[in-house]
Amino acid sequence: MSENIENEIVQTDIDCDYDSLTGLKSYANFKALAQYAIDCDPEGVNAGCYSLVYFDILRFKVINDIFGTQAGDEILIYLAKLIKTLAGVQSIAARINSDRFVLFVRQGREQIEKLVIKLTDDIAHYPLPYEIICNMGIYVTTRVMRVESMIDRAILALKTIKGEYVKRYVFYEKSLRDAVLGEQEITSMMKSALEDRQFVVYYQPQYNHNDGRLVGAEALVRWMHPKRGVISPGVFIPIFEKNGFITSLDLYVFDEVCDFLERSYKKNDHIVPISVNISRRDIYKPDLVETMEKIRIKHNVPVGLVRIEVTESALIDGVARLSGVIDKLHKCGYIVEMDDFGSAYSSLNALKNIDLDILKLDLKFLSDGGNRNNGGIILSHVVRMAKWLGFSVIAEGVEQTEQADYLLSIGCSNIQGFLYARPMPEGDYVKLLESTPLGHTKPAMTLIDSMDADNFWNPMSLDTLIFNNYVGSAAIIEYKQNGFIEPLRLNKKYVEELGGHFAVDDVIKQNFLATLDATNSALYVGMLERAISSEGEEECETWRNMSCGPVCIRTAVRLIGKSDNSYLFYARIRNITSEKLAMQEIMHREKVFRAATEQLGVYYWELDVPSRVMYPCFRCMRDFKVPPVVVDYPEPVIKLGVFPPESADRCREMIREIENGARSVEADLPLTEKRVMCRVAYTVEFDSEGKPSKAYGTAIPL
Ligand code: C2E
Ligand code: CA
Ligand code: CA
């Protein structure tokens, strides 16, 4: 793009063809323009003065599903503008399809790196409650070639970071092409390797995070190469998928798994189902299911013990083909899992048309490196979605307890990941089976109907907005009847209410019961038990030992969900420490005052002048049976005989004097039927307008 290439091109009369959504060039037009620029400036190209960038938005389909296609379109328009603004008018940019963009610009390595860093930053700040991540593969020109070859190189680079969160862009290096050569080597070795039994099946256990039981395993293949050592499936599976060998390998793995199940089945009852992967290539084999059935029957393995994982990417080849295979599998009785759910490929909506049993979420695709909240948003949305569609959910790639706990709180208890165990050889897996309590893949936690569960877990819903912002201090608490209590989700206000300066994480991580002594923890558990049986709201007040000192918390809970042995509660709290301390103080003073009045033999009361409501002291209540609140004073007290007839009028008159503004009133009167002579006196208090508000009365026997 020596001077103003676009103008030159327009003059050369190449058709101007634009992408209607973003206003960028069409792909065909891009290729023509970029090729022209390359051919016009061979020296610049050879000297590395140009870059070609290939862009791909991470999980764009998921974004579309969650926020709607309009929001998706707006992101595309935004990205297009961003590319154009950052790269300048002389750059050539196009949208290839969907969320794939390409840019050709006269910028060398350093300049283009600055550009992509700026772009990564800008797009991350796009105003959506979800971080937009754009992966970029960059080819800095090395020599004149076809623009298509440059695009291929940028894509090759991009593929090495696809699905990564930390690394957003990558430069094409020659070593990447060398890796492609390794592909030929792998292809030449694969057949003999299969015959030599170099492919070995590893097992990665799956657990129920509710109770730690082992509920299943996934079969994962390893290539034990005699010279190269262990080759990971990440290296050879994509190659086998390309050259078609994957189907032979998958059937081999299926056979090995059935063989293992047959042996365990004969030996003992330590047995849980095993999931076997089938590749998207396999679904093109017309007799796939029949072949699998022959293998399974040969080994006498009950169909319930093998599950089939189909990959989400199989959807690219169309729902119909995949559905056909799933139907066949279902007819034979297999449980079918959708693997890698949440990777960029599938549309959540497409799932409505597929008859699956279990969704397998990969945290790698769903969590948002670094940003837990966004990951949580996606996760809870997907789990909710899965519930709508009636699927069970299992999460894989779970590495941290926090992740597992969060998953549990959103209703996904089945977990596979390094947190519990890595894939292991058969021998280790057998040992594990023998030493771990086994269970079943349990249904997801059901939320009680009256609570709008769908909305509650929907990150965009009003309920969630309310949970986070408006309900005051709230938490979701899990309780198991073996006494285990743990907060799963807390909002900020909950943490603030506890006093002190805690982080939400700290409070979640902290051992909840350790903050309560035996008496208080019994109070708390009692409240939970009451809420389980009443299904209504229950309250309690407990003192908790926090690091900032003891605090008194009033908690109100309501049951919102239950599974076999655990319950979920919605809890609201109020810190009543200062009220409690003030109350204790008042009670203490009251005690002192009581003692003093008793010793002096004084009776006293308080009169609210405008309303004529009177509050007697405890001695008036005890000795004269005056009720705690007297309305229309003094009539009821006169009726009680405390002021006998000869005192009654003077008594009424004293009140009138108070109402008329007297500061104090006094009289010696006989009281009660015993006519005990007493000095009755009032001291009056006035409001800001000078009207009498309160009168304090005393009666002292003379
Ligand atoms: P996949 O089916 O999604 O398998 C899960 C992968 O995640 C496994 O990688 C597993 O080791 C890894 N993983 C499990 N837990 C964690 C965790 O907590 N953190 C992280 N970072 N990773 C975890 P692996 O064994 O390298 O397999 C890679 C992929 O190769 C598999 O992904 C699957 O697509 C493919 N594959 C493996 N065996 C077979 C097979 O027999 N047939 C077919 N068609 N594909 C297979
Ligand atoms: Ca899998
Ligand atoms: Ca997976």
Image: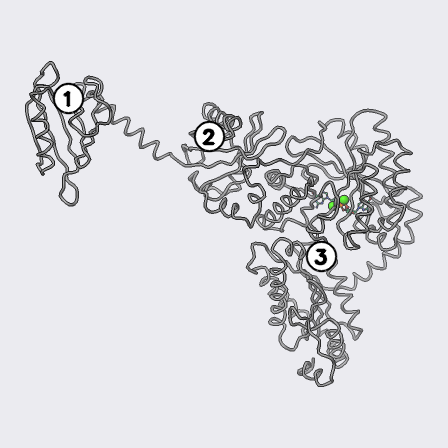
Q: CA distance from mark 3 to mark 1?
A: 87 Å
- The image position of residue 347, as x and y in percent, is 70, 53
The alpha-carbon separation of the residues under discs 3 and 2 comes to: 52 Å
- In the image, which disc is placed on residue 538? 2
Label 2 to label 1, Cα distance in Å? 43 Å
Residue type, numbered disc 3: Ile
Secondary structure beneath disc 3? Answer: loop
Which mark's residue is nearer the viewer, 3 or 2? Answer: 2
Q: Where ligand 3 lies, by image quadrant?
A: top right
Q: Dot 1, crowdedness within 10 Å: few (<14), some or many (≥20)?
A: some
The residue pinned by badge 3 equals 161
As shown in the figure, which amino acid type bears the numbered disc 2? Glu
Q: Considering the image in quadrants, where does the N terminus appear?
A: bottom right
- Residue 664 x, y percent position in the rendering: 8, 33
For the residue pair 26 and 450, the one nearer the viewer reads as: 450
Mark 3 vs mark 1: give the one in front.
Answer: 1
Crowding around mark 2 (Cα neighbors within 10 Å: few <14, some 14 to 19, many 20+) is some
Q: Quadrant of residue 223?
A: top right
If the image is split into quadrants, where does the C terminus sit?
top left
